[in-house]
Image: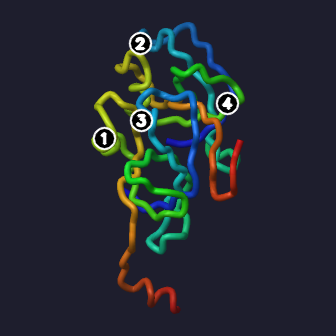
Amino acid sequence: MILARVIGNVVSSVQHRAFEGRSIMVCVPVDTDGHTPLGSEFLAVDSVQAGPGDLILAAREGNAARQILGKDSDPFHSVIMGIVDEVYEPGRAAKAAE
Amino acid sequence: MELARVVARVVATVKYETLQGVRLLVIQPETSAGEPCGEPIVAADALQAGPGDLVSWVAGREAALTLPNTFAPVDCAVVSIVDHAWGDRGRYL
């Protein structure tokens, strides 16, 4: 599971039947500060009504995605499974102050 | 799952039996701002995407699940043809 920031969404009319009615979000992995990008963006299927700007918890692994979203035969690979309220990291405030 | 642009179609007459009839495309991964990111890859396609289309694709075991025969040696597949994408730099496509 990783922390990521939702930066947008994707609209498709021709898609695999498992994706019909699902929201697909454009996400960027971020550091514990919630802003510093860590790597390139990816797409994830939403299960928690996340929107652009939200800090989210995502899994980029098929088994977790299928457990949350559907059947064993659905080709889900990444899923948003939480909206993060706060990341508490002892020492972060001290580091920022330096 | 990521975005990519279809750049070519692959024709392979001789291939493993469970790949018979499977369309293969060369796709270039892109960001939501339309910039290429990473190397082009070959993806299976069950949606009739063609060169120039913006698509989303999955890697790994799930890729084979998009095909009629799900026990196929495929590690990357197109799952949707994207009409438009929104990123932090506005609408793309």
Q: Give whichever of A77, A48 is nearer the camera.
A: A48
Cα distance between the residues tagged 2 and 1 = 23 Å
Q: Are marks 2 and 4 on the same chain?
A: yes
Cα distance between the residues tagged 4 and 1 = 29 Å
Q: Which chain letter goes with mark 1?
A: A
Depth-wise, is mark 3 or mark 4 nearer the camera?
4
* Mark 3 surroundings: few (<14), some (14-19) or many (≥20) residues within 10 A: some
Cα distance between the residues tagged 2 and 4 = 26 Å
Depth-wise, is mark 1 or mark 3 nearer the camera?
1
* Mark 2 surroundings: few (<14), some (14-19) or many (≥20) residues within 10 A: some
Residue under label 1: A63
Cα distance between the residues tagged 3 and 4 = 22 Å
Q: Which chain letter goes with mark 4?
A: B
Q: Quadrant of the N terminus of chain A?
A: bottom left
Residue A87, horizontal then vertical, whole percent: 38, 74
Residue under label 2: B18
Marks 3 and 4, the one that precedes in the sequence:
4
Which three-letter amino acid code belongs to the residue tagged 2? Thr
Which three-letter amino acid code belongs to the residue tagged 3? Gly
Asked if labels 3 and 1 touch by Cβ distance under 8 angstroms, the answer is no
SS at mark 1 in the image: helix
Residue under label 4: B53
Depth-wise, is mark 4 or mark 1 nearer the camera?
4
Marks 2 and 3, the one that precedes in the sequence:
2
